[in-house]
């Protein structure tokens, strides 16, 4: 297992298997690579099944223990089950991030291929709000979540991007995941440095405060030192990378683009290492380079770390979640934003 100059070992790899997507989310950055492509025929630049397996096999040699497939939308690929099946031969811990719209009919096949878990992107359960944000229908997504739970792709993490149009819905989303033991909620900070929509940003201090006040327990996960808030037995995880050197200092992940480029950091595009056409020896050297040259984005690559988001944003009417296994907390009394500055 190799480490970088900051002593960070790499244990996890995220692989984008396509740039195509059937949604068009307002905050999408496509793994930092820009706008997604239409969901039609496969692009010639997409990794083949054999290329994915070869990259995963080398990653295993360097101590990588888990693989997560991303996109675009991975399920626009008809061969994703084969990709998963070939991957688990090398690294058994394989998961998937998806918008969920195509998951219902394929959840069982993915599980049979060896997939362990799924993350499904859901920013709200309100159909019209969902359509405005994702430009797609929520019904098939919820069907996909239910299918994943039914076949055992658990825990199913619901990814909720926290930005201007979603922050007020956080208590309702906590209520929603509290309704099923197989669900978790992952609150993901909007990343303006990738999308360039500063007006979408919200200050997470109110969100953190609300979570801390209403959670029964707060844990710290090894990856990124993310906080996990327990509402009874309901888990809510906060992913807050923006201008957060602690997050970056505890990152153990590298990425692989849909073109097969190794990538040390989501935020950067100047560290890409192409792998296509490399011999086995040169491919191993490419992995050594991407791992040993990694630099924490905040605190290493970016050293001038200051506030970059509006002071406050409103989440009016927020109330405490009705968490399963715990007493209903008191109303949030305006926590999440009695102080609006629009």
Image (cartoon, rainbow, N blue to C red):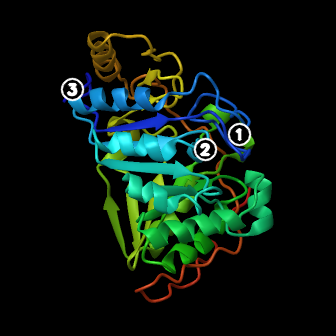
The image position of residue 83, as x and y in percent, is 44, 40
In which quadrant of the rendered image does the N terminus lie?
Answer: top left
Residue 261 vs residue 128, the one in the foreground: 261
The image position of residue 290, as x and y in percent, is 35, 20
| Residue annotated with mark 3 | 2
The image position of residue 184, as x and y in percent, is 46, 66
CA separation in Å, label 1 and label 2: 8 Å
| Residue annotated with mark 2 | 73
Q: Nearer the viewer, mark 3 or mark 2?
A: 2
| Residue annotated with mark 1 | 39
Q: Is residue 170 shown left or right of residue 292?
A: right
Look at the numbered discs 1 and 2 and tell me whether their residues touch, using CB distance below 8 Å: yes
276 w.r.t. 63: above or below: above
The image position of residue 53, as x and y in percent, is 37, 32
Secondary element at image label 2 = loop
286 w.r.t. 302: above or below: above
């Amino acid at each position: 297992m190799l480490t970088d100059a900051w002593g960070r070992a790499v244990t996890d790899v995220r692989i984008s298997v396509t740039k195509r997507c059937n949604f068009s989310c307002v905050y999408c950055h496509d793994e930092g690579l820009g706008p997604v492509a239409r969901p039609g025929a496969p692009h010639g630049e997409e990794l083949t099944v054999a290329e994915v397996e070869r990259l995963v096999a080398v990653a295993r040699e360097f101590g990588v223990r888990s693989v997560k497939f991303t996109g675009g939308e991975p399920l626009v690929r008809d061969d994703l089950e084969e990709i998963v099946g070939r991957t688990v031969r090398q690294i058994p811990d394989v998961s998937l991030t998806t918008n969920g719209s195509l998951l219902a009919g394929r959840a069982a096949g993915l599980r049979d291929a060896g997939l362990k878990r799924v993350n499904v992107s859901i920013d709200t359960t309100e159909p019209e709000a969902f359509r405005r944000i994702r430009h797609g229908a929520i019904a098939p997504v919820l069907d996909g979540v239910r299918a994943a739970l039914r076949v055992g792709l658990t825990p199913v993490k619901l990814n909720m991007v926290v930005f201007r149009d979603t922050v007020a819905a956080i208590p309702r989303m906590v209520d929603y995941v509290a309704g099923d033991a197989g669900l978790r909620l992952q609150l993901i900070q909007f990343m303006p440095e990738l999308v360039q929509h500063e007006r979408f940003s919200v200050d997470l201090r109110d969100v953190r405060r609300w979570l801390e006040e209403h959670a029964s327990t707060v844990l710290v996960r090894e990856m990124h030192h993310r906080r996990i808030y327990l509402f009874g037995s309901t888990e809510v995880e906060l992913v807050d990378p923006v201008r957060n050197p602690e997050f970056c200092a505890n990152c153990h992940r590298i990425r692989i683009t849909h073109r097969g480029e190794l990538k040390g950091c989501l935020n950067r595009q100047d560290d890409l290492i192409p792998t296509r056409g490399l011999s086995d020896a040169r491919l191993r050297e490419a992995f050594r380079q991407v791992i040993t040259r990694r630099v924490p984005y905040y605190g290493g690559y970016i050293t001038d770390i200051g506030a970059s988001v509006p002071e406050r944003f409103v989440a009016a009417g927020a109330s405490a979640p009705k968490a399963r296994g715990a007493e209903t907390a008191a109303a949030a009394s305006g926590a999440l934003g009695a102080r609006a500055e629009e």
